[in-house]
Structures are given as C-alpha cells and as structure tokens.
Amino acid sequence: MKNKRREMIVRLVSQREIQTQEELCEALHEEGFEVTQATVSRDIKELALIKITDGEKSRYSVPQLQKQALDENGGIIFKMIADSINSIDHALNTVVIKCASGMAQAVCLKIDSADIHALVGTIAGDDTIFILMRTEKDAERLCRELSMIIESRK
C-alpha cells in the first residue's frame, strides 16, 4: 500500500501544481487513498520531493534523478547503478558514494547527466565518488534520493 501511495504521489506532483501538503492529501483522497497529513509529510521527505518556484508560487516537484529512475528506460540503468553502490553518506555539503571496484565512473556519469539542481560538481575514482552540493540540506536530499532509488531497484 505504501509503494502504491508513493507512486501516486509522484504521479500527482508530476501532473498537477501541488503547493501544500494539504492539497496533496486532498488529491490522494480523490484517488482513493486514506492518508493523514503526517503520513504525507513522511512520504514527501522519504521521496526527497523538492519545492520549486514558478514565478510567485512554489510547488512540489520530483527531482530530476528520481524522474530518470522512474522512467521505463532508466530502470535497467538504475538497477545496474543500485547493484554497483555499496554505501552513500555525506559530510556537510559533500556526498560520498562508495561503489564496487571499477564502477564509480559509470555511476558518476549517470549522476552528472541527470542535471541535478544544486549539484556543483563531481569527482570519480575507481570505487569512490565525491559530489559537491550547494548546501548541507541539498546533500542530505541527494543521499535520501539515491538511497530510495537503490532500495526500490534491489
């Protein structure tokens, strides 16, 4: 049930301009999901949804990397990435990804091509990737997003 609800949340924020958690709760109720605001809040955090600004309004959005992971064609690539990553962590605004030997550059290439907002730059060695994000909050969000993609692909 949780996975179906989260899939619906991703679909809703991709198709509609959802500005508040209350609006998201109402949209989920319309789709037949009985949820509380607290549940929606946890889902937003675990899905690593972001708020973007369109002019004067802000709305929830699915980060670019998450969109690619959910895309049909991205599934195979993200399965390979999920199998290659051993750990993800961050210190301040730097994300560190430990990979299987020889896989860091392939994983880094996919991350670079995702055009992730707030990503400053990446460096990949043989089995380690350093990602510099603009803020600590951005680093935390990227860690959550990557962890979620990995969990959903394994």
Image (spheres, grey):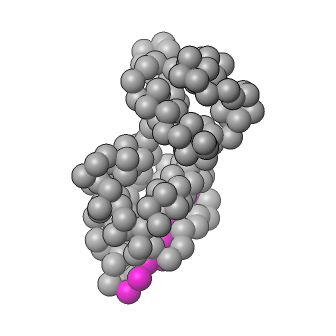
Residue 12 drawn at (x, y percent)? 47, 26
Is 118 placed left or right of 25 in the picture? left
Q: Is residue 74 above or below residue 31?
A: below
- Give the total of numbered labels: 0
Identify which residue is drawn at 61% across, 20% down.
29
Q: Is 37 in the magenta?
A: no
- Secondary structure mostly taken by the magenta-highlighted segment of the chain: strand
Residue 49 drawn at (x, y percent)? 53, 38
Q: Splitting the image into 4 quarters, where does residue 87 fall? A: bottom right
Specify the farthest residue to the left. 73
Q: Splitting the image into 4 quarters, where does residue 102 fall? A: bottom left
Question: What stretch of residues is rendered in magenta?
Answer: 93-101
Q: Is residue 84 above or below residue 133?
A: below
Q: Is residue 112 visible?
A: no
Identify which residue is drawn at 75% across, 33% down.
38
- Quadrant of the image containing the N terminus: top right
Q: Is 98 in the magenta?
A: yes
Specify the farthest residue to the bottom. 101
Identify which residue is drawn at 53% across, 40% down.
4
Residue 24 drawn at (x, y percent)? 58, 23
Identify which residue is drawn at 49% across, 33% down.
8
Is 106 placed left or right of 2 in the picture? left
Specify the farthest residue to the top. 56
Q: Is residue 81 visible?
A: yes
Residue 85 drawn at (x, y percent)? 45, 73
